[in-house]
Image (tube, rainbow, N blue to C red):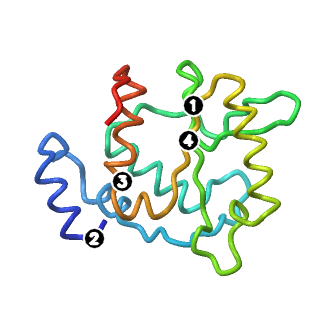
């Protein structure tokens, strides 16, 4: 989302006028090809960008790094356990040679994880940097609506 589109989005959503400048700056942080931060336990830059956009859009507070499988110790990046909804942030989609999620072994491992989550009743949404760059509201608002009880497809 470029600056012009961001300003238009806020103009089209006057209920968000109380957001401060810091929140707007956080929303527009660079996001393509992000790498995991060196500090253990912190999310990637892309995960932090998602969290900021989610908050600005009024999404309900998620649990972060929720372990959903006792045996395999798998975790979701963001989850709402009562609703069994999870969001996985898929970074590295434009990294030369591929990121962890789109190289063969990582992709196959993710498929096993997501299939196990589906079998356990979870709805898992996958979000990429492009989705946050090009149309964050278009990709995230349907998930927000689902979490608020609106089950209609957009």
Residue 15 lies left or right of residue 53; in this view the side is left
Locate the C terminus by quadrant.
top left
Q: Residue furthest front?
A: 153
* Disc 2 from disc 1: Cα separation: 30 Å
Q: Which mark is residue 72?
A: none
**Residue receiving disc 3:** 136
* Disc 4 from disc 1: Cα separation: 8 Å
Locate the N terminus by quadrant.
bottom left
| Image marks 3 and 1: residues in contact by CB distance under 8 Å | no
Q: Residue at x 47, y 68 (%)?
A: 31
Residue 135 lies left or right of residue 107; in this view the side is left
N-terminal of the pair, mark 3 or mark 4, is 4
**Residue receiving disc 2:** 2
| Image marks 3 and 4: residues in contact by CB distance under 8 Å | no
Q: Residue at x 58, y 52 (%)?
A: 89
* Disc 3 from disc 4: Cα separation: 14 Å
Q: Position of residue 118 (x, y in %)?
A: 67, 30
Above or below 43: residue 96 = below
Q: Residue at x 54, y 28 (%)?
A: 80
**Dot 1, crowdedness within 10 Å: few (<14), some or many (≥20)?**
some
* Helix, strand or loop status at disc 1: strand
Residue 30 image-quadrant placement: bottom left
* Disc 3 from disc 2: Cα separation: 11 Å
| Image marks 3 and 2: residues in contact by CB distance under 8 Å | no
**Residue receiving disc 4:** 87
């Amino acid at each position: 989302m470029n600056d012009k589109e961001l300003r238009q989005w806020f103009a089209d959503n006057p209920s968000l006028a109380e957001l401060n400048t810091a929140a707007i700056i956080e929303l527009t942080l660079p996001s393509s090809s992000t790498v995991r931060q060196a500090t253990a336990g912190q999310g990637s830059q892309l995960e932090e960008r998602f969290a900021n956009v989610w908050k600005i859009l009024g999404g309900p507070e998620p649990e972060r790094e929720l372990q959903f499988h006792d045996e395999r110790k798998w975790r979701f990046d963001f989850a709402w356990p009562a609703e069994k909804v999870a969001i996985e942030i898929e970074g590295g989609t434009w990294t030369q040679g591929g990121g962890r999620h789109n190289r063969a072994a990582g992709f196959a491992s993710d498929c096993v994880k997501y299939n196990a989550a589906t079998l356990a009743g979870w709805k898992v949404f996958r979000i990429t940097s492009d989705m946050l760059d090009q149309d964050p509201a278009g990709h995230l608002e349907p998930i927000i609506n689902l979490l608020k009880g609106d089950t209609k497809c957009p």
